[in-house]
Image (cartoon, grey):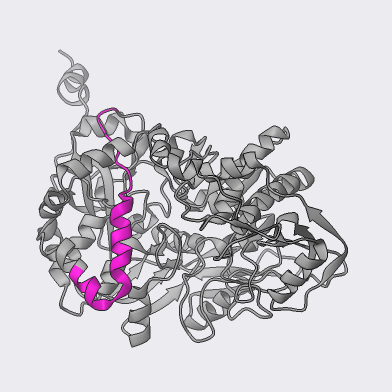
Amino acid sequence: MSLWRTLVDERLGTIHQPTADKRTDLREAIERHVRPGMRLNPVSLQARPVAALHELIRVFGGGDPGFEFISSSLSGNYLQLVGAGLLRKAITSFAGEGYPTPGPSPVTARALAEGSLELENWSMLTISQRLLAGAMGVPFFPTRSLAGSDMARELAESGGYAEVPDPFSTDGSSQGVIRAYVPDIAFVHAWAADPAGNAICFPPYQENIYGALAAAEGVILTVHHIVESEFVRAHAHLVRVPAEKVIAVCEVPYGSHPYGNYASGIPTLQPYANDYPFMMEHRAAQDSEAQYREWLEEWIFEPGSAAGYRTKLGAERLDALEYLAGAETWREELEHTAELLDAAGAPSPVEEMIVQAARLICERVALAEHDLVLSGVGQAALAAWLASHLARDQGLEFALAAETGMYGHDPRPADPFLVNFRNMPTTTQLSDVFETLGLHACGAGNRCLTTLGAGQLDRYGNVNSSWNADGRFIVGSGGGNDLANASAELMIVAAQRKTTFRDEVDFVTSPGDRVQTVVSTHGTFHKRRGSGEELVLTGVFESAGASAAEVIEQIRARCGWPLQVAESVVLLPRATEQEIAMLRLFDPTRAFLGKRGRKTNGSTQNENA
């Protein structure tokens, strides 16, 4: 037989299987590879490396390891690193709690007040851009974000952001750049991997695996399943972390709990949903330091290991989460809230606001030819979801997007959480923050209308979601600054009150240049030519008072700046019964809708408006 035939038969006819076997116990991986003072990146995909961070707390809790943390958010289980005293510094875009509604975390507030934690607040896109630059080996990355905000000023002072001359410009313009970031260790939780560490991850990818690829010492990988290399090759399009970057592979089923893990198209991989009751219990425990220490003891230290944690959760709870990950289980969930939905009640001011915002979204889509609507969380998201249905009745078409990487979704009822697992099978594209924010919503020539909420808002549309004047941290930018700087148009949805509508915001998180409209619980504001780029009251809600003049005076009393009123103010008709019914289907437990309204003297009122 000729040599080449022998080589084909003996060497080349079969596919080489990796011989590396990096399987190890999770505790051993942490003890072997993690050292005090390291720069850590828990990679936030749609799954989180919860089990790995629990083990990190067990190994280093009670000491002072002084870790530096970078990730797109410091929320949920990541707050446990703060409560256990493991972090010296956090670099993030959002620091607070996200479920059921976004808000500050007492854990972060206590650490900042006592000076044990330093917080460096970036935007969501720039976190991914910094990690991508680190992975690429370049010292900095150009960005359209941050410019014109107080974030830019602070980050320039700390050496992370600069505006430099554009070397290719003919008009002397400048370009914002951000410093690359290289973590020492990255933690990833994946669906499956072979013993060598080739990891299968399902989108949406949120901040993506740039931190894992940048990590100087490699990735500690936890997986739901360890599989053969043939399985990995059969699904190579889902492999996001190559084995060469992995230093330890640890099989930890349900290692993302209480966060779910989405999977599609591979029948042997059973997805599981977010454990919302567990998230609520964790949030409630943050109210006092003593109570939080008890929670950490009960759920992290006492179980002793990831296996002990699963035992404490129990098979019945985990089976229920697998069931709830089903795409059509929202129908059953609606039946559980039927009593709430059937209860007659007048629309609240918040509901009126969301309906009016949805109508205005349709109007702006038609006038400005927007083809994409990206929403923030909560009421801004509900307005966009409702608008997607109202638009169909008007023959309008636009895509919905969420910053975590969901694009073209058709929102399912029953769950208003932005990353509702049941929305994922309805998408036309699943990607990541870099693509959704950096290319679709904020890229060149985008036609994106963005809807956002606001903690503080001034007459120019500047928004603050970062710092109060007394030094208290709110929640941070998230993707707000990115969108404010680069999407085609912004709409703000916010309750009409003086604490929100401020003469001057305490801190400019998101500049207001691209804000064109604001919808409050009483009326609508637009920027008009000749207004000096100030917001002008153009419409009032019929539901808010007996007459337009009465509503204008209510708004004036609840506005912190001298109110400009258009010469002709439109009286906007009440929300219809169908619009309200549709809206309530998206949020049947009223996480964002709040208390129901009640009728008083011909107007709709609500105690928490």
In this view, the residue in front, 496 or 389, is: 496
Q: Is residue 274 left or right of residue 402?
A: left
Residue 379 visible somewhere in the drawing: yes
Q: Position of residue 268 (x, y in %)?
A: 25, 29
Residue found farthest to the front: 601
x 19%, y 36%: residue: 227
In this view, the residue in front, 492 or 236, is: 492
Q: Position of residue 171 (x, y in %)?
A: 76, 68
Q: Is residue 52 above or below residue 93?
A: above
Quarter of the image where the N terminus is located: top left
Q: Is residue 287 magenta?
A: yes
Q: Position of residue 192 (x, y in %)?
A: 24, 40
Q: Is residue 390 magenta?
A: no
Residue 444 visible somewhere in the drawing: no
x 18%, y 70%: residue: 294
x 77%, y 78%: residue: 562
Q: Is residue 2 above or below residue 399?
A: above
Q: Position of residue 482 (x, y in %)?
A: 57, 62
In this view, the residue in front, 365 or 247, is: 365
Question: What secondary structure is the stretch in magenta mostly built from?
Answer: helix
Quarter of the image where the C terminus is located: bottom right
In this view, the residue in front, 585 or 215, is: 585
Highlighted magenta segment, given as a residue range: 267-294
